[in-house]
Image (tube, rainbow, N blue to C red):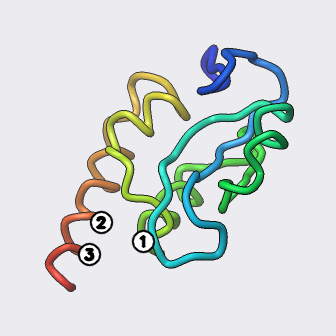
Amino acid sequence: MNGNSCSNCSSAEDLYFVTIGSPGGDLPGRALLYCPRCRATNQHQVDISWPLALLTPGTFLQLYRTGKTESDPRQAVRIVFGPGHDWISTEAGDILERRRLGE
């Protein structure tokens, strides 16, 4: 998507959006981009793994709604969608705030 690269090794090939945390756990994971090699190397930490080419704003926001990530929305949107997608980070931030307030 927008000149993105692996958060670990900077490869730009076949990127996946991943959350790093406790696979299958209840704790929210950190949102990153991984290439296939880094994803395999760190698979013991990867909870969510989604091909970047298939990740939509709606799917991305659903990860915030379900508590699968609490990464800084501005940073996560920038690494996934690139600049100019402020509405996505605003919506993700609103979701986080509502979750924190218990709504």
Quadrant where the C terminus sits is bottom left
* Front residue (pair 25, 1): 25
- Give how far across and how far down residue 35 sits, in percent: 78, 30
Q: Earlier in the sequence, mark 1 or mark 3?
A: 1
Pointer 3 local density, CA inside 10 Å: few below 14, some 14–19, many at least 20 = some
Foreground tag (2 vs 3): 3
**Is 66 positioned to the left or the right of 11 in the image?**
left
Vertical position of residue 88 compared to residue 29: above or below = above
How many badges with numbers are in the image?
3
Asked if the residue at tag 3 contacts the one at tag 2, i.e. Cβ–Cβ closer than 8 Å, the answer is: yes
Secondary structure under the numbered disc 1 in the rendered image: helix
Crowd band around label 2 with a 10 angstrom C-alpha radius: few (<14), some (14–19), many (20+): many
In the foreground, 89 or 25: 25
Task: Evaluate if marks 2 and 1 touch, with contact meaning CB atoms under 8 Å apart.
Answer: yes
Reading the image, the residue beneath label 3 is 99
Residue at left 31%, top 55%? Answer: 91
**Cα distance in 3D space between marks 1 and 3:** 8 Å
Of all residues, the one furthest to the left in this rendering is 101
SS under mark 3: helix
Q: Could you tell me which quadrant the N terminus lies in?
A: top right
Cα–Cα span, label 2 and label 3? 6 Å
In percent of width and height, residue 97 lies at: 19, 65
Amino acid type indicated by mark 2 = Ile
User: In this view of the protein, which residue sits in the foreground, 20 or 70?
Assistant: 20
In this view, the residue farthest toward the bottom is 103
Q: Earlier in the sequence, mark 2 or mark 1?
A: 1
Residue drawn 85% across and 31% down? 37
Give the residue number, with chain letter if any, for mark 1: 65
Mark 2 highlights which residue?
95
Quarter holding residue 41:
top right
Q: Dot 1: within a 10 Å radius of its alpha carbon, few (fewer than 14), some, or many (20 or more) residues?
A: some
